Structure formats: structure tokens, C-alpha cells
Amino acid sequence: MKALQQAAESQDNDARIQLSKEYNEIRLAYKNYIVEQIETDSTNIGNFSSIQRLNPDEDWIYILKIRNGLSPRLKGNIFFDQMANQVAQIENQKRSQAAFTPGSVAPDIVLPTP
């Protein structure tokens, strides 16, 4: 990352492009490693730190696997409970967004008076 920043500062576009490519390859390999660890054992306590490196838009199923896998073991732990609440909020948000996708049935509108 430091070399990439230096290439950008020195305006060395060839080096910047090459370093960007290498950086993206490393990030993808790291993400694949995390996903493999989650798939292997979703109850592993090490997955707790991995959740921070996942993108809710791209990696939602893995976030749920971590939460569900660690819940029996860590429920009641303040840090786990905070993470589980954040996941639940995102889950509710995703559910709400799904209700408004084109082609879906519109939700009922409930108002105090007609």
C-alpha cells in the first residue's frame, strides 16, 4: 500500500497500475482465505474478527454464518451482542429494501385515518 501511495505521489502511472493490480490480487486472496475459514468452521472464534473485513453487500451469507455459528458460544458477551445487533439492523434494512424492489408487491399503507 505504501509503494502504491508513493507511485501515485510521484505520478508513475505504470508502477501505480501494476501495484494496484498486485494489491487487488492480495486483497482477493485474503478474502478467499477468510471465506474458506468461515466455510470450514463457522463456530471458530477467529471468525469474530473476520466479520469486520467482510462487505455486507457482497458477503452477507458469510456474515450470517458467523453470527449464527458463534451465537451459541458467545451469546451474552457484550462484543458479540453488539455485533449481533448490528447484523440484525442490517438484516432488517435488507428486508425493507427487498419490499420495494421493482416487481414486488407493495406493502400495505397503514395510517391513523383514511
Image (cartoon, rainbow, N blue to C red):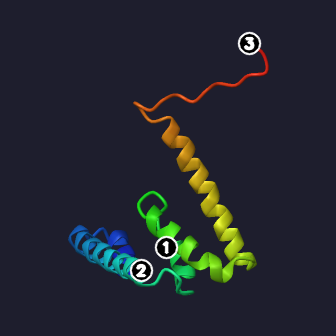
**Label 2 is placed on what type of residue?**
Ile
Q: Secondary structure at mark 3?
A: loop
Q: Is residue 19 above or below residue 111?
A: below
Q: Residue 3 location in percent, x, y?
A: 35, 81
**Residue tagged by mark 2?**
34
Frontmost residue, 26 versus 41: 41
Q: With 10 as the anchor, is 73 left or right in this view?
A: right
Residue at point 31%, 79% (across, down): 29
Q: Residue 8 location in percent, x, y?
A: 34, 69
Front disc: 2 or 3: 3
Mark 2 crowdedness (10 Å alpha carbons): few <14, some 14-19, many ≥20: some
Q: CA distance from mark 2 to mark 1?
A: 9 Å
**Which label's residue is closer to the chain start, 2 or 1?**
2
Residue at point 22%, 74% (across, down): 18
**Residue tagged by mark 3?**
114
Q: CA distance from mark 1 to mark 3?
A: 48 Å
Q: Are marks 2 and 1 in contact (CB under 8 Å)?
A: yes
Residue at point 27%, 77% (across, down): 22
Q: Are marks 2 and 3 in contact (CB under 8 Å)?
A: no
Which residue sits furthest top? 114
Which numbered tag is attached to residue 40? none
**Quadrant where the N terminus is found in the figure:** bottom left
Residue at point 60%, 50% (across, down): 92
**Residue tagged by mark 1?**
53
**Which label's residue is closer to the chain start, 1 or 3?**
1
**Label 1 is placed on what type of residue?**
Arg
Q: Are marks 1 and 3 in contact (CB under 8 Å)?
A: no
**Label 3 is placed on what type of residue?**
Pro
